[in-house]
Amino acid sequence: MLAGMRGCLIAGMALLCAVQSSAAADDFYKGKTISLIVGSNASGGYDGYGRLLSRHMGKHIPGNPSFVVQNMPGANGVRSASHVYSVAPKDGTVMGIFDQAMFLRQLLGAPGVKGDVAKFPWVGRLVSNSAVLFAWHTAKVQKIEDVFTNELIVAASGAASRLNWAALNTLTGTKFKMVTGYEGPATAKIAMMRGEVEALSLPWSALRAENPEWLRDKQINLLLQTGDKNPGLEHLPRMVDLAKTEEERTLLEIFASPSVVGRAFVTAPETPSERIDTLRAAFVAMLKDEAFLTDAKKINFDIDAMPGAELQTYFTGASYPPALIERAKAIAKQAGY
């Protein structure tokens, strides 16, 4: 009898705590706005996926907060990441999406966020990013094999692309000539059409959504995929396929690791755990929302999601032999990192 009463009391207390927690979440976010800091200008995959999330995630958060997108380009995403890490309120009212290579940069000892990228509370990933390198139709390089004998001038506005092409040059003998200084994909694409550069890389979904006419009219040639094969591009070589030895392949896997991060979202470190849980739960609920899925399909954006807790495990579990990390650092150093 007493055991039964005690069980009922414990169950009742648990239910009361759950109700109080839900009510507290409702009270906190009700009437509030969540700022989404996008580490690029208003174009390309980071901005596109950020705005997609901003249109749908709020209704899955208790209290239904609104979202406002704030573009904060600069320093290869370090400016935006540093803002979320050190400056933003640590209360769950700020989220961020920034350069997918931030963790790799930290791994390689390159200047970046003053803090541990793995300590960001990761809310979730909307899509992995096996970017596609493509060249304008007038370039001498028509297929990836051509880049071993012909120089290819590539716009490299993000850290991931610069590290990829530098690694391939060092390890496999490709002849990429990188041009930096472009704020984002929009300016890089204009530069390519003007003849200032011959190639650049974009997520496959972003390329199909933003410039389908390039594909339709054969104005570009697809050369390479930086990560896993994209659906429909099973014939196109991957970066790791250019490796000649197992060690080269592992090194290229290290440099391709940003494709796992892709278009992923964080909140500020030291945000209360219950708010992190609330944001992660809302992210997962959004993925099942028909309105969200219809919107993604309408703008031709692929969804290859990973929950925040799983993504967090990736950061804490990623490890490579120290000797390979040192060699990767040497390659990055040669590339100016």
Image (cartoon, grey):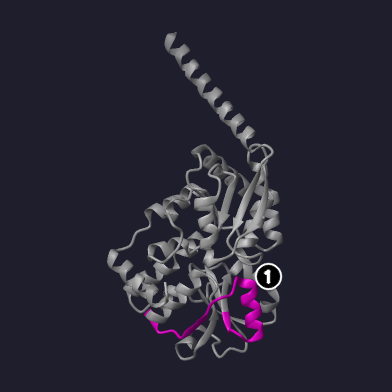
Occupied quadrant, residue 111: bottom left
Q: Position of residue 92 (x, y in %)?
A: 56, 43
Q: Quadrant of the N terminus?
A: top left
Q: Position of residue 46 (x, y in %)?
A: 60, 62
Q: Quadrant of the C terminus?
A: bottom left
Q: Position of residue 113 (x, y in %)?
A: 46, 59
Verify whether residue 189 appears in magenta. yes
Q: Residue at x 55, y 22 (%)?
A: 16
Question: Closer to the camera, 240 or 27?
Answer: 27
Question: Closer to the camera, 325 or 8?
Answer: 325
Name the residue type under label 1: Glu
Q: From where the camera sits, is residue 277 visible?
A: yes
Q: Residue at x 53, y 19 (%)?
A: 12
Residue sticking out furthest to the top: 1
Q: Is residue 117 above or below residue 166?
A: above
Q: Residue at x 39, y 52 (%)?
A: 316
- Give the total number of marks visible in the rendering: 1
Q: Position of residue 34 (x, y in %)?
A: 63, 47
Verify whether residue 14 appears in magenta. no
SS under mark 1: helix
**Mark 1 packing: few (<14 Cα in 10 Å), some, or many (20+)?**
some
Occupied quadrant, residue 51: bottom right
Q: Which residue is mark 1?
A: 210
Q: From where the camera sits, is residue 226 visible?
A: no
Q: Is residue 330 above or below residue 10?
A: below
Occupied quadrant, residue 320: bottom left
Q: What span is in magenta? A: 171-199
In the image, taking residue 53 as reference, residue 260 lies left or right, namely left
